[in-house]
Amino acid sequence: MPNLTPSDFLAAAMRRNQRLVEIRRTLHSNPELAFEEYETSALAQSVLGELGIETLTGIAKTGVVGVLRGGAATDGSRCVALRGDMDALPIHEETGLPFASRNPGKMHACGHDSHTTMALGAAMILSEIRDQLPGTVKFLLQPSEEKLPGGASVMIADGALANPPVDAIFGQHVAPMAPAGAVGFFPGNMMASADELYITIRGRGGHAAMPQLSVDPIITACELVTSLQKIVSRNVDPFQPAVLTIAKIEGGSATNIIPDEVKIEGTLRAMNEEWRRSAHTMIENSVKGVCLTNGTEYDLEIRLGYPALNNDPWATAFAQESARQMLGQQAVFDAPPMMGAEDFAYYLEKVPGTFWWIGAGTREQGCMGGLHNPKFTIHESILPIGSALMAWVAYRYLVEGKN
């Protein structure tokens, strides 16, 4: 087998730079929301088909799985998966780009257009050397990373990690305000679990000047918000990350009316699954106790979100070394953990792997907005870099990976 180098992969990606930019801009101008990625899915199918890669559709509704079987594979050869998520967000774009969203109220404000492009870029590179691949590469083009239940969980349920079974999985996410093309890694719990809280407090409305004749859900809601904050501040080890935020309170219609009900919504984030489960019980007890004290009734829904994202230490070190080989030490950084959530965590519960950050560009490089911001964009120089790195990691894993 020829001794391929990271420079070979980077050169192969650079030859396809114009095509990568074209794909990314097409996706960016046509953002589609969770489980509605029909045109995005069709484009992914078309690219994989042009490359002669076996393509499976109808997985997780709009998901696509490309299966590239290496010509040097044998019985028992490894299988590695690369993931690119496809969905956009319900945000109206304000970048002013010539290829800005043509769909009002929808925008690729989290970089999934570039994630999909780089996964397809990796497919372009690896398909060119398919005869030399000693194993199988799966390309998971996934819907609905932004919306529960998370497209990853549905992809898994629909068999994306089977036939052949995946031995390791790798993914990446753009990082705004980091230099374009720099890559960051973190072994272990890099991102938090995310549960959604929905609480309805029901009282008895009436005249605001005669509160004794009413049961006030607003007073109850105020007490409840304070009570819920104690769950983290007084029940978590200060060295253990956790967040409980109430982000929405809705109730009332006028200064002289006590309403019948108030709605509260929020989020719970945790890095520890055991504490996460215990927090659910504490939330329920807090809501029950405060409402009972105030004479109100309640409905509580804790909508389970993504688990904490736990990067496999070996896979992280392997990908990090691959990045150093390709980009040099100066382009590789140690990424801090964060309380954001990612449904890539579902894959990592099933198979070892890692998820890394790739710098999207700084303000000096023209990238002005953060994730989920209407002015978010990327520096397109990252497209061949991210494509090459994913392909190099997959190739190295098939050749040298852990048994």
Image (cartoon, rainbow, N blue to C red):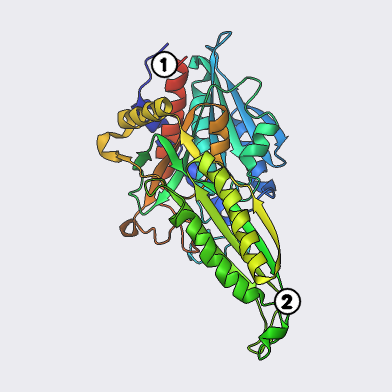
Report the residue marked by disc 2.
260
Indicate the position of residue 328 as horizontal and vertical percent values: 27, 33
Residue at 57% across / 56% down in the picture?
A: 29
Tell me the distance, in whole angstroms, between the alpha carbons under discs 2 and 1. 65 Å
Residue type at numbered disc 2: Asp
> Which numbered disc, 2 or 1, marks the residue that appears first in the sequence?
2
Relative horizontal placement of residue 29, taking residue 36 as reference (left or right):
left
Q: Which mark is residue 46?
A: none
Residue type at numbered disc 1: Glu
Relative horizontal placement of residue 246, taking residue 317 as reference (left or right):
right
Tell me the quarter of the picture where residue 215 sits: bottom right
Dividing the image into 4 quarters, which one contains the N terminus? top left
211 to 366, vertically: above or below: below
Tell me the quarter of the picture where residue 389 sits: top left
From the viewer's side, name the closer residue of 395 and 218. Answer: 218
251 to 46, vertically: above or below: below
Indicate the position of residue 338 as horizontal and vertical percent values: 42, 48
Q: Say what secondary structure mark 1 lies in.
A: helix
Indicate the position of residue 388 as horizontal and vertical percent values: 42, 33
Residue at 36% across / 45% down in the picture?
A: 336
Report the residue marked by disc 1.
400
